[in-house]
Amino acid sequence: MTQRHPSGAKVRPAFPARLVSVEPVAASGGKLASIRGYTQSHVAPIGVGLDSGAVRQKMVAKIAQGGVNHPRVLAALAAIDRDRFVDSALVNQAYEDTSLPIGLGQTISKPSVVARMLALLCDGVAGRAGRVLEIGTGCGYQAALLGQLFDEVYSIERLRGLHDKARDNLRHLRLANVHLLFGDGMQGYAKGAPYVGIIAAAGGEAIPACWLNQLAVGGRLVAPVCAAALNGGEQALVVVDKTAQGVRQTMMETVRFVPLKSGVA
Ligand code: SAH
């Protein structure tokens, strides 16, 4: 059945099998809540405090102090409740600047790193128009943030258990523009291409050529890559800008992400 975005635009068909598209948020219409104006609509989990919105503001303030000052990224971080994406035993740490286990040996990145990567992505993409691709849905937290920042988000995960978990975690947000896909992100997702932005949450030996092929001219890719030049196979964040003249690659700081693996499981 053809699905429609609230704007009336057709939602692209699913690949390989599953496309999660839920109803738009009635209260906010899916729009960004402003940092100051944000109010929490659900009961905060025990341990996070009575108002997880306030805890989130503190997290955002620290991230801003740490140097990420992209207003839209900070607003997205203030709007999305990270505590809803981690296991109940870890909610106390949901707003600390730390990576946390999300099951199946994978981790949700620490918020400052997520913020940094999103700011790099947004800096390289003019406005919010167009589709973005996320490789490595994990628990769905970054997909939710991307959903606040871009018109259409395709997020692909190779582990069925996490793909399902992300779908459950995202349900309460009702983001009609976030599409979860189960598959091998090493192949990208050709049906959604070209993308104005591609962001990977797992690091491989190199950037797969198909990611660059699926990136729009004028688009930006942000990914951790195991750089041969670095000690002991350390990873560095790499930014790739695709222009009409070719691709320009910039190495940023070292990072630590889970490995990019091929195939599904
Ligand atoms: N953005 C996620 C981070 C998850 S960790 C979050 O907010 O939670 C990185 C994820 O990348 C893991 O879930 C891992 O299974 C996934 N991954 C690794 N290789 C992949 C591939 N080839 N295709 C899709 N997902 C992959």
Image (cartoon, rainbow, N blue to C red):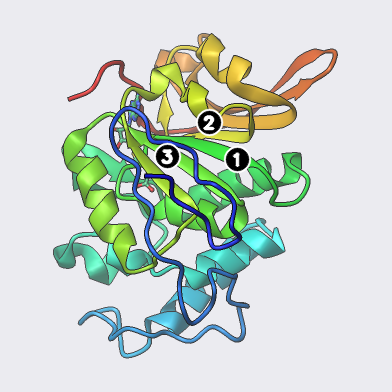
Q: 219 and 107: which one is in front? A: 219
Q: Earlier in the sequence, mark 2 or mark 3?
A: 3
Question: What residue is rendered at 53% in x and 78% in y?
Answer: 28
Cβ of disc 2 within 8 Å of ligand 1?
A: no
Q: Residues within 10 Å of mark 2 (few under 14, many from 20)?
A: some
Whether residue 64 is situated above or below residue 48 in the rendered picture: above
Mark 1 and 2 residues: CB-CB less than 8 Å, in contact?
yes
Q: Please, which residue is most extreme toward the bottom here? A: 50
Badge 3 vs badge 1, beta-carbon distance below 8 Å: no
Check disc 1: other Cα within 10 Å, few if <14, some if 14-19, many if 20+: many
CA gap between label 3 and label 1 equals 11 Å
Closer to the N terminus: mark 3 or mark 1? Answer: 1
Circle 3 residues within 10 Å: few <14, some 14–19, many ≥20: many
Q: Which residue is mark 3?
A: 155
Q: Secondary structure at mark 3?
A: strand
Residue beneath disc 2: 192
Q: Nearer the viewer, residue 145 or 46?
A: 145
Q: Position of residue 87 (x, y in %)?
A: 18, 60
Q: Quadrant of residue 40?
A: bottom left
> Which image quarter holds the C terminus?
top left
> What amino acid is at disc 2?
Gly
User: Can residue 62 be seen?
Assistant: no
Helix, strand or loop at label 1? It is: strand
Q: Which mark is residue 131?
A: 1
Residue 132 location, x and y as percent?
57, 39
Question: Which kind of residue does numbered mark 3 sit on?
Answer: Ser
Residue at point 42%, 15% (across, down): 233
User: Does 16 sit left or right of 233 as displayed?
Assistant: left
Question: Can the viewer see residue 225 in this picture?
Answer: yes
